[in-house]
């Protein structure tokens, strides 16, 4: 029997507020353990929480950016369960009246567009973090709790089970990450846990409408792990079903080192959490005026920006998609072309040499050693034929460590392109005279042989001869 996967994601997005959701403690990442805590986030008896208004604003903006309906009346609930890093024995979350519902985003996988529906977006507090003495809980003699993260504000973005492959799940999570970055509600640093996903996977016979039994994998915080975990779980469930077994509804964990999922505990249903309205927090009532105010503050979103780059600058759908995948890269691109740099050249340099250097150093484009203005100036030197594309690569390498303007670097290094016809003609004549075999091959019908002659001219000119002029002069002399 052939099976198809049914996949849904619950993405937890940590918000970039200065303070926690219900108290004034800082949310700074990496602080000494248990230094950003107070009686409220430690769940001491008799304390009262107060909602952080910024969290509500970010929740509404996230809902608007993902085409959700904003609930003008929403409330908080207590989600009751015991875990060592949950000091109150409940998590303050939202259950039946979340801040936003019924949204959607579009994804693109291998040229095929697909709409993924969002069930809901709700606000909640994060739990603490267990700190094990060993590398895992199994090889640890002790485990302690760091409560710094307790009460850090989260948005939980819950999708419908509309994905059917690991590639679609990755594209969906990348789209959510991009949108959250664009609207500036989260840093989305996955390595810091700002963005992580719980993955629900089930299988059903191809053509069936009935959902199979699902398993959940918790706290996946990289795109590679997301794909690997889903692919392994699909394969595992398929083997169980083909052997006549049954899938158990459970929570599993993904072991990246071994590339497998492992059982943790039976999966809870909503009623197992004994939800109850949070008595210490009033309902959130939002006016239409407030919603429209937040809507007006939203920036141009990734899909709209991609369409604009295609229409205004003639970028391909692929190039525009890469450029707009992050707000930082899109804004860098806009800054590069602001003073007249060619958009297509700008896109090629950003996606090519610049991205290669940034990836090698592991840094974001916002911290690029070559700022957008200087890259734009270098591209304009190419457009003016001051330097060739080949020389530009040398100039760019120098710009990585040299803060001077591209024009000064070109002058100081003697890299100005030779565009004087007589000067190039002299080099061309010398190369023709010294490379008789290549000349004979070309005249004998092997037109590709001109490439060897072009290479010799560029070598003799130390890469400074204008390549178009070199090709033109060689063709005229060889065909004359």
Image (cartoon, helix red, strand yellow):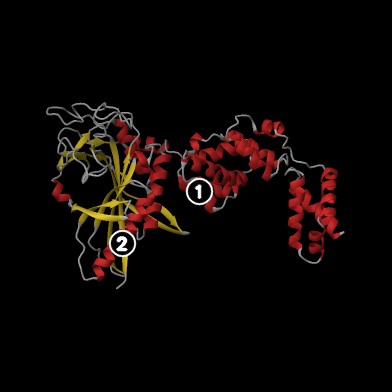
Above or below for 477 versus 444: above
Crowdedness near tag 1: few (<14), some (14–19) or many (≥20) residues, C-alpha within 10 Å: some
Percent coordinates x, y for residue 151 in the rendering: 24, 34
Quadrant including the N terminus: bottom left
In the figure, is residue 212 to the left or right of 407? left
Give the quadrant of residue 99: top left
The residue sitting at 32% across, 59% down in the picture is: 232
Q: Which residue is mark 1?
A: 322
C-alpha gap between disc 1 and disc 2: 29 Å
Give the quadrant of residue 3: bottom left
Percent coordinates x, y for residue 224 in the rendering: 38, 51
Residue 122 appearing in the image = yes
Q: Nearer the viewer, residue 398 or 84?
A: 398
Q: Which residue is mark 2?
A: 234
Q: Residue furthest bottom?
A: 1
Percent coordinates x, y for residue 459 in the rendering: 74, 47
- Mark 1 lies on a secondary structure that is helix
Q: Nearer the viewer, residue 145 or 120?
A: 145
Percent coordinates x, y for residue 295 in the rendering: 39, 39
The residue sitting at 53% across, 38% down in the picture is: 332
Residue 104 appearing in the image = no
- Mark 2 lies on a secondary structure that is helix
Looking at the image, is mark 1 or mark 2 nearer the viewer? 2
Above or below for 113 versus 26: below
């Amino acid at each position: 029997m052939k099976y198809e996967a049914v996949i849904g994601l619950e993405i937890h997005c940590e918000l970039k507020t200065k303070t926690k959701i219900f108290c004034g403690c800082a949310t700074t990442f990496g602080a000494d353990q248990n230094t950003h805590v107070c009686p409220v986030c430690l769940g001491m008896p008799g304390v009262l929480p107060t909602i952080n208004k910024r969290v509500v604003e970010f929740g509404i903006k996230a809902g608007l950016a993902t085409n959700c309906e904003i609930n003008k009346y929403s409330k908080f609930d207590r989600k009751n369960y015991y875990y060592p890093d949950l000091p109150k024995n409940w998590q303050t979350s939202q259950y039946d009246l979340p801040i936003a519902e019924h949204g959607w985003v579009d994804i693109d996988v291998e040229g095929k567009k697909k709409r993924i529906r969002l069930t809901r977006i709700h606000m909640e507090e994060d739990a603490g973090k267990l700190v094990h003495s060993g590398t895992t809980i199994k090889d640890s003699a002790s485990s302690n709790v760091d409560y710094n993260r307790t009460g850090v504000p989260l948005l939980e973005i819950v999708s419908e089970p509309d994905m059917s492959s690991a590639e679609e799940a990755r594209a969906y999570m990348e789209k959510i990450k991009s949108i959250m970055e664009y609207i500036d509600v989260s840093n989305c640093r996955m390595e810091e846990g700002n963005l992580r996903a719980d993955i629900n996977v089930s299988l059903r016979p191809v053509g069936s409408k009935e959902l199979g039994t699902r398993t959940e994998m918790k706290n996946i915080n990289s795109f590679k792990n997301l794909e690997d975990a889903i692919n392994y779980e699909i394969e595992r469930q398929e083997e169980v079903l083909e052997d006549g077994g049954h899938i158990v509804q459970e929570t599993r964990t993904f072991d990246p080192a071994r590339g497998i999922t492992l059982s943790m505990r039976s999966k809870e249903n909503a009623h197992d959490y004994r939800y109850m309205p949070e008595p210490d927090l009033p309902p959130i009532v939002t006016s239409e005026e407030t919603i429209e105010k937040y809507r007006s503050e939203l920036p141009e979103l990734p899909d709209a920006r991609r369409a604009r780059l295609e229409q205004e600058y003639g970028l391909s759908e692929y190039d525009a998609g890469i450029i707009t995948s992050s707000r930082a890269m899109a804004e860098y691109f806009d800054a590069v072309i602001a003073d007249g740099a060619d958009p297509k050249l700008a896109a090629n340099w950003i996606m090519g040499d610049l991205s290669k250097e940034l990836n090698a150093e592991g840094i974001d484009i916002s911290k690029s050693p070559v700022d957008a203005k200087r890259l734009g100036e270098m591209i304009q030197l190419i457009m003016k034929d001051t330097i060739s594309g080949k020389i530009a690569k040398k100039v760019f390498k120098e710009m990585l460590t040299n803060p001077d303007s591209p024009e000064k670097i070109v002058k100081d290094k003697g890299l100005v392109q030779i565009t004087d016809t007589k000067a190039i003609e002299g080099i061309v004549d010398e190369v023709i005279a010294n490379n008789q075999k290549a000349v004979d091959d070309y005249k004998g019908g092997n037109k590709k042989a001109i490439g060897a002659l072009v290479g010799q001219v560029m070598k003799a000119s130390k890469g400074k001869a204008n390549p178009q002029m070199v090709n033109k002069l060689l063709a005229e002399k060889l065909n004359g």
